[in-house]
Image (spheres, rainbow, N blue to C red):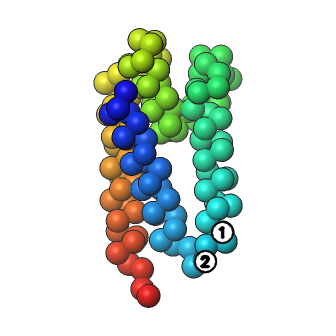
Amino acid sequence: ALLFMALIALLFCSLGTAIASVLENVHGFQLIMNLLVMPTFFLSGALFPLQNLPELLYKVTIFNPLSYGVDGLRGSLIHSSHFGILLNISMLSLFSFSLLFVGAFLFSRIEV
């Protein structure tokens, strides 16, 4: 469970760094983060099972990194995983480290 929590934290820190690096002021950051985080959370499977979603929304959840984090936490804590633990770890790692490199690259290009 700690691995999934660490990867989810890395994912959202990297996402925040990447988005903040391209914005010129702080005022838009909160709006953009809320527009991204709220739908990501609602379509992650944390509030309702992914199996009951319509086909189109289910396809969207496949590209939602938080779906793998929530499913991985659920699998490691109560042994009920939809995607499988290895797929959860690999997909969450892929999303997290990809965003980490993008965020680091964009942050290095900031001119003060």
- Eyeballing the image, is 17 above or below 48? below
**Residue found at x 34% / y 75%:** 108
Q: Quadrant of the N terminus?
A: top left
Residue 55 visible in this rendered orientation of the protein: no
Residue 61 in the image: state x and y as whole percent.
Answer: 56, 33
Residue placed farthest to the bottom in the image? 112
**Residue found at x 56% / y 73%:** 23
Q: Quadrant of residue 80?
A: top left
Residue 71 visible in this rendered orientation of the protein: yes
**Residue found at x 49% / y 29%:** 70
Q: Which residue is mark 2?
A: 25
The answer to whether marks 2 and 1 mark residues whose Cβ atoms lie closer than 8 Å is yes
Mark 2–mark 1 distance (CA, rounded to whole Å): 7 Å
Q: Does 54 sit left or right of 95 as displayed?
A: right
Which mark is drawn over residue 28?
A: 1
Q: Amino acid at mark 1?
A: Gly
